[in-house]
Amino acid sequence: MRLHGSLAFILGMLLMLGIGWFAFPLALYETIDQPLQFSHKKHTGEQAGMSCEDCHGFREDGSFCGIPTLENCENCHSEPQGTSAAEKVLFKDYISKKREIPWLVYSRQPENVYFSHIQHVKLAEIKCERCHGPHGKSETLPPYQRNRISGYSRNIWGQSISGIPSAPWDGMKMDDCERCHAERRVGASCLGCHK
Amino acid sequence: MKIDRRHVLKFLGGSALGTALSPLPWKVLDDVSIWTQNWSWIPVPPKGETVIRHTTCALCPAGCGVKVRCIGTQPVALSGLPGHPTSHGFLCPGGLLGHHLPYDPRRITQPVRLDSAAHQSVSRSPEQILSDLGKALARLKTDASAGRFAIIDSLPGRSTSLAYRQLASQFPGGTYIVPADGIKKSLCVFNGVFGAAYPELGIDVERAGSILSFGADLFEGWGTPGRLLRKQQESDAGLRLTQIEPRYSNTAAMAESWLPIWPGTEPILALGLAGVIIREKAFNPGLSPAIDALNQISDFRDLLAALPPERTAEICGISAEAISRTAQEIAAHPPCLALLGGSYSGGPFGEDDYLSVNLLNLLTGALGAEGGLVPRRALPEIDPPVANLASPTDLAGVPDESIGFLMIDGTVARQSIPSAVLRRKLVRDKAVVVSFSSVATEYADLSHYVLPVPVYLEAFQEIPTAPDFPVAAFSFSVPLLSPPPAATSPVEWVNRLAGSARLDWAPLSTEALAEARIKAISGCKRGSVYSYADGAMKSNSDFASAEELGKAFRSGASWLDSAPDPVKPELTKLPYFQPETWGRLKRQVNQRIEVRSKPADETVTLMPFATAFVATASPLAGKLTRESDLYPRAGDALISPSTASRLALQEGQRAELETGKGRLGVRIRLNEAAVPGTVFVPISGSDADPRNLCEISEDSIWRATPAKLRRLDV
Amino acid sequence: MSDSMDQKKESGRHASHRFGMAVDLDRCNGCGACMLACSVENNIAPVPEEADDRKGITWIRVYKASNGAAFPEARTVFVPVLCQQCGHETPCVAVCPQQAVDVDPETGIVGQMPERCLGCRYCMAACPYHARYFNWWDPVWPKGLEKTLNPAVAPRMRGVVEKCNLCHARLQAAQAKAAAEGSRDVKADDYQPACVEVCPTGALTFGDLNDPASGVSKLARDQNSFRLLERLGTDPKIYYRSKRSWVRELAEQGLSSRSKS
């Protein structure tokens, strides 16, 4: 009897552990493709040789450009530069229609978050990879995994469902920011990072 | 083995523990809490690059310089432009919310026909409306009983005004009406005194020694507010302002002294002060011959003798000591500017009022002197598109029940003429009224049709010289947004109406007229241009061509004429030296004294007034009225506590105002700073406008009206 | 001085400021431009028609007070009141159960976090200056007006308290501009709250109270300057000034003699 009871208990536990750790993450995130398979490697590699700041740069007033607008792409791509399928989509759906590309932004934060790129990049001299990972070397854009409940990208919580970061760039939640701020002993007031 | 309840419970228990040890409940909780903080109906401001652009505010004749902060192409915040030569960084509450105007929920985006009883738009297509209007216009030419064509231009002197004048000239008896501007009207007395080269006068407040203001709302929107505010900030002595008005307005609160005068007795005070100045020989010495000439006129001598300080004080309700003190102040700090011109709500004063007050300007030597009333050139003119354009007419000069087709340009966002005044001029039951407007409310109770026009920040518009400015000035209000498709410029509407009425009409274009103006300014080779973007002041002659000047204007710039050399005024032309003037003034004064000496009974004197600055339609304007107590609300009636107790009224009570013209429900607000016996009611652009209750005199003036005020016991 | 400079280099902190304001009550003409500029800058929503001044949201609000005299000696003073940025035992910080408000040691600004607030309104009771406002309703702007919102400030939902933070978004913009020039120090000219920027009479002066040479410090030391409810010991950073003794006396008497209209 007792053995059977324990079995039921263990079965229940294992079942929910399995669901919680494996099935749940699969169901929680919805995978959406980016509108265009942009290859960072093509642009940062030997051929074009651009750096992060060439497209993701700063304006004179210190504000960050973020994801570049179509105008930025058109600086070079006013005419086809290569033969890839992605570039064909660029011309067919966007440049010819003068339509901005609806990129899905991995690092999109809630409205009340204020992050000043220039203070981190220029004053604190933090490299892009520290928070964004080796994104600049990627051949294709990773799939955008949208959390079905909160609406934010999986990159914010972190890839691992446990919430324990596997790399410095895994996770962009408040505690991830707080960790680094505590290490460097900087800026602890709330409005420093909120608006 | 039997599976019984205990197994199920153990299974559930294990599941619960497993769930707790898995991330599922914790992550779901976390995500749900994020979800609850990101409701889809909380607006998310659009992101983009911050771009600074510039324009000139078009909401009132002052034409302040505006710095526009845009996100991409969308204006999100307006502020003043420090360094701007006329506005000096000032932008009023109305101007600050100007970027909300294109989104006013009451915005008219299609031509509409209003059912004036229900204020609802009757469904009629734009083509049908144009055709209806064309027919009505054509009828004016053939049917004499249909009445005359008239058009009201709220901001005359623009190149658009030429289109209006041309349209009016197409009809027999066509009238081009210019509503009386308080400041311009107050200076009418001196028209032509500086000769043909200087047809206008400016007010040199910057160098005035002191200011005597008879009800002029100097800190609440008078003229170009930035000028006064800068002088007040920069000068240690301030403006040396004596504010003379029945209500302790915000201007009176900022003045060095406030004289609480009984409404209607302003000219008497002015004459009383003039008497003191002449008796004490405190007038400008250069005017001795003029004073001698005046003293030859017996009516003049009698009038001034009848108003010694004690008598004046008695009539006006202020102390004799205050009168003497004021006269001393005028003499001690020349030049003294005497300004009569209340807020636009009260409308213009009468001719005789202006005569009396401007006598002070004459006596103190303010006329033609630095710091006084200075000669001003007109704006460089454009060649009229056709000959025989209709000339500007005063509303008072239009006979009652004579207008068969009235067009109203309400570009300046103030309903400066009460509907009752206009209604009198319309042919009964037959007149057609069309207004150019972006919202339905302005003159809505009068209009049959509204034709949509682009609003501020969408419209390319001329801003001619502000009425108070000492030199001619000009700028463009530059569009930063696109208007709704059917909202067309007034000039284009005029073209379409002329076409629909099959008039003999050469189409005009806003662009071509603007180019003509730029060319005229470039061609006069005078003055300098202030560019908003870099704050640089460049001489007009340094611009290589009219195109280059045009480019500067289109990115935000202001042209100022150079100051003329001093000109001596031709005093002999002035009405003061004609004996008939003084006979008339004597009669008017006696009339006022008679009205004043009537015993105080149940009546109060109704005084409409405008709240400071331009009314604005933005929902944020409610911060000043509903969400705080700063500005009075529509329907408030301010009365002094002593009057309230006489009439057994209390704060917050509902009451009714009644005059010969009708009734109005109001809410009592006690205000210690209102002259006892008066009731001040703020104007509004609606049926509840107190001006509809006012007696309107022969010359279209509405002012202090006797009224009954009683409690509403409901 | 040199010690704190070394500390600055080590920890990467910005220099320590105490941002404050001086209000000249003899210059305020009650136009309300400050209230409107504040609402535009901070995306403050208009409240529904049925609301009155008890439920309005006006981070800065201009009150009218009178000298209590009868006609014709009645006189008015206009008093703009905003969050006084209390420096000592800040009442709202002390009572908040959520730690949704804090005092930034680097700027002295008392920062309210609406996203953390649970809406208990304890802070509204604690604030002696009535400078905190509750969102009784979700923000509703007429169609199209949401395009004119300022992206530098996040709109709030209903059920949370908000208040003036000396236009912190503008401080952030000034810091970004300084960073673009490689500096950690904000230039005084680059940071000015919206109310100060638009005040037409120059009644509002803003600056760093820690800088004895700044305009605001000089005005704060003026003999005619006072602070509201000074006896409570909140050490506010907003100084008021008037040459008129009746105005100064009125402030000392506290709230009871403020008239309604």
Image: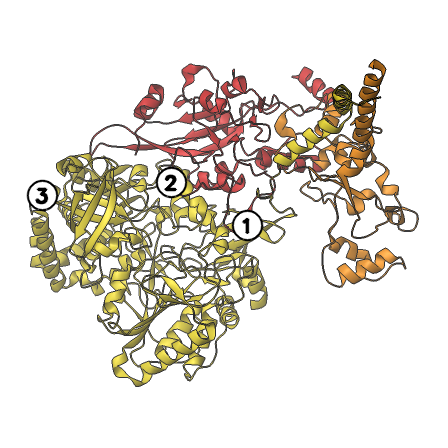
From what the image shows, is residue B329 above or below residue B572?
above
- Disc 2 marks which residue? B626
What kind of residue is marked 2?
Arg
Q: Would you call the spot at circle 3 few (<14 residues within 10 Å), some (14-19), or many (20 or more)?
A: few
**One can see residue C163 in this view:** no
- Disc 1 marks which residue? B68
- Disc 3 marks which residue? B600
Q: Would you call the spot at circle 1 few (<14 residues within 10 Å), some (14-19), or many (20 or more)?
A: many
Q: Which chain is orange?
A: A
**Which chain is disc 3 placed on?**
B
Decide which of C76, B654 is in the foreground and name it. Answer: B654
Indicate left or right for B208 with C103 as reference: left
Q: Quadrant of the N terminus of chain C?
A: top right
**Which chain is disc 2 placed on?**
B
Residue B75, percent from left and from top = 56, 51
Between discs 3 and 2, the one toward the N terminus: 3
Between discs 2 and 1, the one toward the N terminus: 1
